[in-house]
Image (cartoon, rainbow, N blue to C red):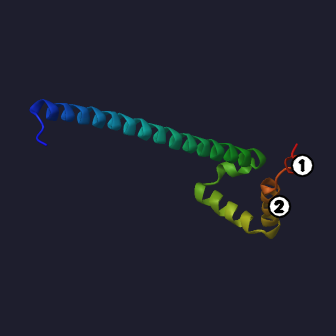
């Protein structure tokens, strides 16, 4: 059961090589995770910017409001029942599958 010095040295070298491979694999996975997370952040940032620009394009007057005033205005608008109904309607439409998808087209 006793191993020679050469056998132990070989096992050590093999183990070290495997450890380095696993470290590289972990680094690749961490890089991939960071890349995917940054992509979703970029998508969110893009969505927020384009929607903010849309608000300013239909209501240019909001450009002069402070951030706090703008948020307060948006909160007041969102409290109106007709606005809530309209948002709910659009969300329901978006979440329903298209008729062509139902028919298997």
Question: Circle 1 sits in a helix, a strand or a loop, which is it?
Answer: loop
Q: Position of residue 57 (x, y in %)?
A: 75, 44
Crowd tier of the residue under label 2, counting other residues whose Cα lies within 10 Å: few below 14, some 14–19, many 20 or above: few
Q: Position of residue 3 (x, y in %)?
A: 12, 37
Give the Cα distance between marks 2 and 1.
Answer: 23 Å
Residue at 27% across, 32% down: 17
Residue at 47% across, 38% down: 32
According to the picture, the residue beneath numbered tag 1 turns out to be 103
Task: Looking at the picture, tell me which residue is in the foreground, 90 or 79.
Answer: 90
Q: Position of residue 42 (x, y in %)?
A: 57, 41
Q: Quadrant of the N terminus?
A: top left
Left or right: residue 97 versus residue 4 is right
Task: Looking at the picture, tell me which residue is in the foreground, 22 or 75.
Answer: 22
Residue at 71% across, 66% down: 76
Determine which of the numbered discs, if any, sits on residue 89 in the image. Answer: 2
Query: Where is 45 relative to 77, above or below?
Result: above
Quadrant of the image occupied by residue 10: top left
């Amino acid at each position: 059961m006793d191993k020679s010095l050469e056998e132990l040295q070989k096992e050590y070298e093999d183990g070290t090589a495997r450890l380095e491979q696993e470290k590289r694999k972990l680094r690749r996975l961490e890089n991939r995770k960071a890349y995917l997370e940054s992509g979703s952040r970029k998508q969110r940032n893009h969505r927020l910017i384009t929607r903010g620009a849309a608000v300013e394009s239909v209501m240019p007057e909001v450009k002069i409001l402070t951030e706090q005033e703008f948020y307060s205005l948006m909160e007041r608008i969102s409290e109106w029942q007709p606005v809530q109904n309209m948002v709910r309607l659009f969300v329901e439409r978006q979440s329903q599958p298209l008729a062509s998808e139902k028919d298997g087209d």
